[in-house]
Image (tube, rainbow, N blue to C red):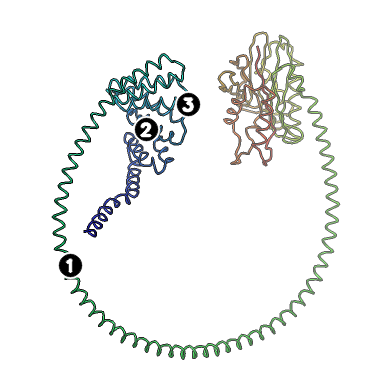
Amino acid sequence: MGTVKVRYLIVLLSLFLLPLGDLSAQTEVKIKKLEEQLKSASSKEKPALSLQIAALYQKSNPAKALNYANQAFITAQKIKDPIIQANASNLLGELYSKQNDQKNALKYYEAEIELREKMPLTEHLAKLYYKVASLYKNQDKLRRAAGLYEKSLKSAGKLSLKPLILTNYEALFSTSYDMANYKEAMGYFKSYIHIRDSVFQVKKTEEISEIKSDFETEKKQQDKKIGELEQNNEIQHARIGELNELAIRQKLEIKTKELEISKKKMERNFLIAVLCFILLIAFMLFNLYASKKKANTKLALQNAEIQEQKEEIENQRDRIASHLHQLEQLNKELFQQKEEISAQFEEIEEKSAIIEQKNSDITKSIEYALKIQQAILPTIEEITEAFPESFVLYKPKDIVSGDFYWMANAPGNRIYIAAADCTGHGVPGGFMSMIGVEKLNDIFTQASHIGELHPAEILHHLDEELKKTLRQPGAEGSLSDGMDIALCEFNYNTGEVIYAGANRPLWIVKNKSGKVTEYAPVKKGIGDVYEHSPQYTNNILDVDTDDMIYIFSDGYEDQFGGDKKRKLMKKNMKVLFSSIHQQTPAQQCEYLENYFKNWKQEEMQVDDVLILGIRFKV
């Protein structure tokens, strides 16, 4: 009887433990299946699938559970599914609460409350009020806690949830007491005592009825089990007798077979031992023969190698003798070449010294030319005096520059300023820049009606004068050089700014919006020769106080650099000017110089650089 009971218990235990052992594997399979579904799911299906995966990961992998719950919350918010969003908020609150991250837990619990308050009242919302209130109470946020306890109490009353009503009265009593609202605390305490007696009486009656019902059910089941066990006991006794008799017969048969097998095994083992001995003797004899044959073969190979080495040594001796003779010849030739190279080196050193002296003389001449060029350009102080909020970024490619800037004062409280880019750079560009400055000065000096002269007329005169100076077009020895220029007239009596350009634009960056407005030039350089030459035109600028005005040569935008070793380009310059236009002119100048240096990196400067920036003031 005892053996039967033990077997019965083992069977029951195995049936119980089998599904528990596979629970993790089943969950893993389910998660993988849901994740596959999530990849191809529609936007409406994704929130629910993400929430299911988060719930499965909740205990085993809280980090993944948080990730999927967040996905469910965000996607549900996008498709405006308040139920999934509320459930995701609840799960996020639970996960953060377990991590003791009460700030985020409260954030998502509050989000869930806001969503569920728009739905029909449920027991879950009533309990959620209570849970969140308790979290606030633990943080000593008693007023917020009291308000949520009140909501929970009100909801529990509507749903007739007496245990929750009782719990809320107790919490409100404790909270009011902590807030020193002793009168309210006493009221809550009285309500708690009244409800508690009612709840306990109902609960006690229900428990007694439940115990009585369970007892009667259990008694009937026990009586039934006792009858079944007695019947099974008689059947088992009869079955055990039959099994014992059968077991005795089987044991006799097994013993007989074991004796026969043992006899055959002994005969087989003897035969195997004799065969193994014979094989061992044969193997030893074969191994001895093979070793002897291998030794003879090795000896023969060694003799052949020795003979080959002897012949190779004799051949090498002959080759060495031949090489020694060749080396003697080469040594004589090298000595002769050394004498020739020494003579050539002395000649090169003499020529190098001459070239260095010439370079030094040329550099000094160019440096003196720089001083002359600087002398004819307006000083930074003069420009700053005329335009207090302005800057000049001037970076020649070589010592002297083909870019120049020019300024002149005229009657009627007017100031003219220009930025020009001459053909070439270095010494040729420097000569052109000096011609340009001189011609502009001559135009102003010789003009009899300076009050009526505007930028377009000045550029026309400059074009004519430069062609005469350079003998353009058609004269013997004439040049095709010239310059591109942007020229502005600032009239402080009228508040107008007039611009004319020859292949060089003018940009305005609006102070408030940062928008870049480009005024395009006439596509004709100063000194260019056209069959039908276009006329330079005056442009009255739409400019407000504190807007930035920029005129410049093309050296900055044409500079190669950056990660891809490309030109900076005009569109990137516009973005750059827009980003810095509200800085002071000095800061803008420093920023542009540093940006140019960082952009250029190890690349050579390709052209002269000139940028004039003026903040317009009425």
Where on the picture, by quarter, is residue 342? Answer: bottom right
The label nearer to you, 1 versus 3, is 1
| Residue at the image position 45 percent from the left and 36 percent from the top | 99
Residue 301 in the image, given as x and y percentages of width and height: 58, 86
Left or right position of 212 against 375: left
Where on the picture, by quarter, is residue 65? Answer: top left
Q: Amino acid at mark 3?
A: Gln
The label nearer to you, 3 versus 2, is 3
Distance from the alpha carbon under mark 1 to that under mark 3: 73 Å
For the C terminus, the quadrant is: top right
Q: Secondary structure at mark 1?
A: helix
Q: Which mark is residue 243?
A: 1
- Label 3 vs 2, first from the N-terminus: 2
Distance from the alpha carbon under mark 2 to that under mark 1: 62 Å
Task: Please name the residue that numbered disc 2 is placed on.
Answer: 88
- Mark 3 crowdedness (10 Å alpha carbons): few <14, some 14-19, many ≥20: few
Q: Is residue 315 above or below residue 614?
A: below
Q: Which mark is residue 581?
A: none
For the N terminus, the quadrant is: bottom left
